Image (spheres, helix red, strand yellow):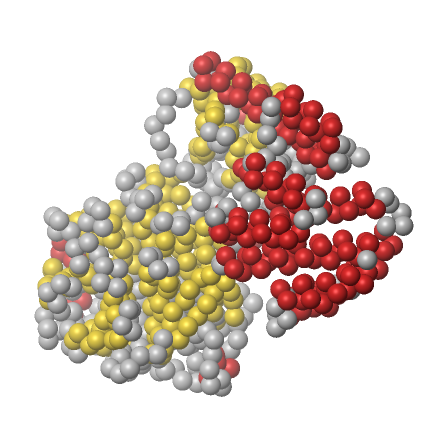
Amino acid sequence: MIMATSSMSASKLDLEKLEYTVHKFSSYSPNYHPCNIQEDKPEDQASRWSSDSNNPPQFLMLKLSKFAVLHTIKFGKYEKTHVCNLKKFKVYGGLEEDHMLELLEAGLKNDSKPETFFLRHKVGGKPFACRYLKIVPIQSWGSSFNFTVWYVELSGNTDWHDVKDGIHWLSKHRENETVRFCMKFLRQMNYTAAFDSLKQESNILLEHPALSELFDIVSSGEYLKTEQFMDSAVQNGMLNSYISKLDYKPSWKSINTDRPRPGMRGGHQMCLDSYSDTIFLLGGWDGHHDLSDFWSYHVSSNTWTNLSTDTKADGGPSARSCHKVCVDPERRQIFVLGRYLDIQFRTAGSLKSDFYVYNIESNEWMKITDDTSSMGGPKLIFDHQMCIDVKKRIIYVFGGRVLQPAPISGEVSTHQEPVYSGLYSYHVSTNTWLLISTEHDTLIRSRVGHSMLFHPIYRKLYVFAGQRNKDYLNDFFSYDVDSGVVEQISEGFSRDCANLPAAGFTHRATIDSDLDEIYVLSGLSKDKDKRDDQVQNSFWVYYIQQNKWVCVYKSEVPNVQYWNKTQTLEPCPRFAHQVVYDSLRKVHYLFGGNPGMSCLPKLRLDDFWKLTLLRPSNPQLIRQCKILIRKYKFKELSYTNMLEAMIYLQSSLYEVIDHTHPVESLEFAKLPTVMFETNTCRKHQSLNHEIYLHRTKLFDELASFFPESMTQPRASLFDIVPL
């Protein structure tokens, strides 16, 4: 059974339905009063709140009958789809109506099914108590229509022990933060006596003692000691959290190996056995024929080994392409399922879905079954996806196109509508198949050429992109294999496309469950502004915890330009390629594929690449800190001694600049103008005060490298003073 939810998977909580009143609202249309949301009447079109405008800010503010820790909000709907349903909204909560915290940002599906969302209900690890709740519509399904809310139901915990703890903690937290804001302001203004008095009286720390030490060093103008402090902080790992939040930079390296090595191909399959540090490659299409060779690549020795020139002769699968493999590294087994057949070869006997397993230790093949469909599994499919839950020894197979028999000789040939396969699970230990969802399921939409990954910790399948009929997809959803919950992470609307990998076919995806990251290398994509399919190079990272996509790089250089180069720094665009990921070394490997060149339609590739995603190393971050610190010292010298400033610029600052880097070199060339700017400023302000403010600004920039839990408040009292 499949259940739908629009937020995190459901959990069993001892919650109660909460009573509330409509406290305030922005506006309402005649007959659609806000109080209507307190009754659930899906058959009554008038039982709703409707704003009198679709221009923000529109809102509903609810007041709970008693203080509570809110856990969920449920939205009821009309019995039919409606253009006024909320496509996007936010929910805020708090003890006071003027001080609220964002608890949820989400959107409703435009259907008739009620949706329940989990609200943020803890702050600082403590229960967050509310008395007021504010619903803020942002977008309706009909872009020019007013906002509508049909029904709202709240649930949470009103146990006074929990609520009181939450209220007490929040009150104390706000008091402490207010004092810290004041302390920051007093120190910024160099009101030393007032700062020391408040610190002693309140006994509250403004920041981690290490940051207080750094402030003393910086404010004293000891720039060399500041560099030494930052060097030590980097080496001690105090800036690791900063590094982890920086975007990756791709580093491709072409892997050259001696013969023998696999030849040109696309539609092949690869998997990586982390136990033996080995990549396995099976079959594919060389532009003329399906292949039945089987190779292994040993990473440490950089050598290919031909394990079999004909796997069928060795008791394994026949020549094939568009099949799928997955590896069980603990039991050293590789499973193989599916293949593509040209229509002239689709006889009744050839459309059986054979299923094989390869034993890595013994170098032996075994046929599990001649036809998985006879066991309740999928029919013969191609361009599907397959991955394994190693812990429970369950293989999941989703999507793919079902091969249909060729028309009988003499019959009028008619266009066959494509048939897609659903979601299946295969239990290795019992040799049994289970159909989880059919191809017609609307929550798990069947497709071909998609990506599917298994997260062993969250126990979820992640599915992205693919093709169904003539539609290229870029929706993104997860399926909880234990609870059956489907979460629609992104529906792939056009407004979101700039922040997602392009809708496409044969994207290649990998997952790092330790880092909570998904990686996607694009394949054949559809450009809505052009008629032809596009083969583009782009690599994306999806951060699961932050629910955020980041494009690491994108290159739209035509393939013909790659061929005209004697040496390239990255692989040319392609599809039908294969990518595997070594989660221990954090390295991707890519082999072969179809470059999609219309002038050479049978051309396939045999290049082999390694991709490493890099963030700044410790030496690079130390150099970045030194550049920042020395720029500040140069500017301070410009206040007092322009000749000394120029000498410092040409020596100490010059030596830490990468003069081969265009941006760094240009910024360095502009630095002499700083001397004239500072010379003008000092005529109008106290020099000592100007220097102090200059040094505190440097401290603020250096503090941004440290975790927020260690630093003074990021915001300032200046930010909350109304103009």
Placement of the C terminus among the 4 image quadrants = top right
Report the residue at 73% width, 32% height from top: 192
Report the residue at 46% width, 82% height from top: 567
Horizontal arrangement in the rendering, residue 231 relative to residue 357 (left or right): right
Q: Nearer the viewer, residue 473 or 668?
A: 668
Q: Nearer the viewer, residue 408 or 445?
A: 445
Report the residue at 18% width, 67% height from top: 351
Q: Which of the 4 quarters of the picture holds residue 322?
A: bottom left
Q: Nearer the viewer, residue 139 or 248?
A: 248
Q: Position of residue 596 (x, y in %)?
A: 42, 77
Horizontal arrangement in the rendering, residue 267 relative to residue 561 (left or right): left
Q: From this viewpoint, is residue 503 visible?
A: no
Report the residue at 35% width, 67% height from top: 589
From this view, report whether residue 125 is shown above or below residue 552. above
Horizontal arrangement in the rendering, residue 489 relative to residue 347 (left or right): right
Q: From this viewpoint, is residue 384 visible?
A: yes
Q: Position of residue 258 (x, y in %)?
A: 28, 82
Q: Position of residue 59 (x, y in %)?
A: 63, 31
Q: Nearer the viewer, residue 543 or 656?
A: 656
Q: Which of the 4 quarters of the picture holds residue 333?
A: bottom left
Placement of the N terminus among the 4 image quadrants = top left
From this view, report whether residue 661 is shown above or below residue 129. below
